[in-house]
Structure formats: C-alpha cells, structure tokens
Image (cartoon, rainbow, N blue to C red):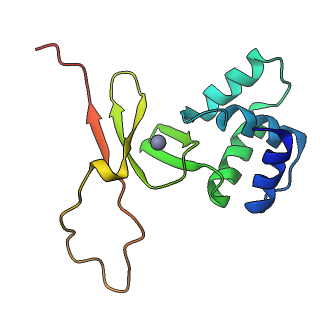
Amino acid sequence: MSRAEFLAKFDQFGIAPTPQRLEVASILLDKPQHLSADQVFEKLREKGSKVSKATVYNSLNLFGKRGLVKECLVDSERRLYDSRVEPHHHYYDVESGQLTDITADDIEILGLPALPEGTVCDGVELIVRVRSDNG
Ligand SMILES: [Zn+2]
C-alpha cells in the first residue's frame, strides 16, 4: 500500500495519521495475516523502528476499535490483529498459536438458538481449534 493509500484508509476510519501509527499499520496491513502486538513490535524492531511497545499496543487497540483491523481474541492470553476485516472464520492451531483464514462461504450456519431478548445477531465467527494428528 502506498503512503497515500494509508492516509486515505486512516481518514476513512477516523484515525489521526501519526508517523508511529503509520509504521504500525504498514506492518500489519502488508498482507493478509494475523499478528499479536508483540509480533508487530518485533517486526518493527527488525526494520530499525524506534516505536515503543506501548505505542504498538495503543495503536493496534485503536485500529481494532475503529475497524481498520479486526481483533481476534483466541483465548484469554492471545489477542491477534487481523488485517482482513470482512467476515470470515478461522482455524486456530492450539500448538503453534497460528490462525488461518476460512472463507465465510466455506461454512454454512444452519441455525442459531434464540438470541437473548432485545438483541440482534451482529455476526457469527467460528474458531475451529486444531492440533497435529500424531495418532
Ligand atoms: Zn483472519
């Protein structure tokens, strides 16, 4: 993505484009991927960036809130940020901690129990937990 495209995206989601935020976004939005805040921080360091860990956490949190990226809470210890924001499902490898996308069309939801009173369905996202098959 070019700088102009990043600026347009930030504008679209109402995010002030500080240089640090642009650096964080350039790592995550580089390709379809799922990264933790620590992984984004490591990649920034590898590139010689001086962005602090706190800024990485704060930026990703803001991006998630505004909808620039999607937050996936796979378990209480692992929060991953997804560069794909359209609805889709995931395989979660419980051994490696890796998330892999499943296209929304590949899973058919046949029915849901009655929703809690006063609510509407805002989306259904499945996490299919997998591990290696060693017999
Ligand atoms: Zn995903």
Q: In which quarter of the image is residue 115?
A: bottom left
Instruction: Give the residue at x 40% y 65%.
Output: 123
Instruction: Give the residue at x 23% y 60%.
Output: 109
Relative vertical location of residue 62 with respect to residue 97 in this rendering, above or below: below
Relative vertical location of residue 124 with respect to residue 54 in this rendering, above or below: below
How far across and how far down the image is residue 46, in percent? 74, 15
Instruction: Give the residue at x 26% y 51%.
Output: 107
How far across and how far down the image is residue 42, in percent? 68, 21
Instruction: Give the residue at x 79% y 18%.
Output: 47
Left or right: 34, with 8 as reference point:
left
Left or right: 56, with 125 as reference point:
right
- Count of marks placed on residues: 0
Q: In this view, which residue lies farthest toward the left? A: 135
How far across and how far down the image is residue 23, in percent? 80, 35
Q: In this view, which residue lies farthest toward the right? A: 19
Left or right: 108, with 99 as reference point:
left
Along the line of sight, the residue nearer the viewer: 107 or 75: 107
Q: Quadrant of residue 11?
A: bottom right
How far across and how far down the image is residue 89, in percent? 37, 47
Q: Specify the quadrant that holds the C terminus.
A: top left
